[in-house]
């Protein structure tokens, strides 16, 4: 099934969620995942600033409510997920 086209806009917040492969839990303690998550979020934010309303980190996924003043959610999410996976698994 093809991916739905992304609508880029700057007026309304996005609800974004990403889950780990096969719904597996992270293989390290959640306290360590939290540290890695904050580093990844900071790196992505420094490169592509967004307005984060709230986020929730769980055992195998996360949720975001965020706005993108520059309509660049795809670039921000790419950077965030790239940093998170590189720091988490290597």
Image (cartoon, helix red, strand yellow):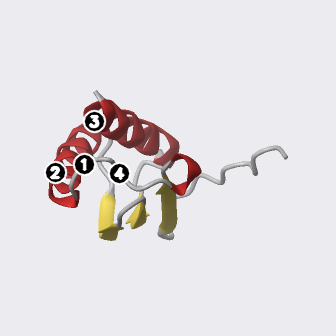
Label 2 secondary element? helix
| Secondary structure at numbered mark 1 | loop
Q: Residue at x 42, y 66 (%)?
A: 63
Which residue is under mark 3?
47
Q: Position of residue 23 (x, y in %)?
A: 53, 56
**Disc marking residue 28:** 1
Residue under label 2, please give it: 32
Does label 2 or label 4 sit earlier along the sequence? 4
Snapshot quadrant of residue 87 = top left
- List the single residue furthest toward the top: 90
Tags 2 and 1 in contact by the CB under 8 Å rule? yes
Which mark's residue is nearer the viewer, 3 or 4?
A: 4
Locate residue 62: give its quadrant. Answer: bottom left
C-alpha distance separating marks 3 and 4: 26 Å
Tell me the mark number nearer the camera, choosing from 1 and 3. Answer: 1
Q: Is residue 54 above or below residue 82?
A: below
């Amino acid at each position: 099934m093809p991916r739905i086209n992304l609508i880029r806009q700057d007026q309304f917040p996005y609800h974004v969620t990403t889950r780990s492969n096969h719904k597996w839990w992270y293989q390290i303690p959640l306290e360590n995942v939290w540290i890695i998550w904050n580093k990844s979020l900071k790196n992505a934010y420094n490169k592509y600033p967004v307005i984060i309303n709230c986020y929730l980190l769980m055992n195998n996924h996360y949720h975001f409510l965020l706005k993108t003043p520059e309509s660049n959610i795809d670039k921000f999410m790419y950077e965030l997920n790239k940093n998170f996976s590189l720091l988490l698994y290597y």
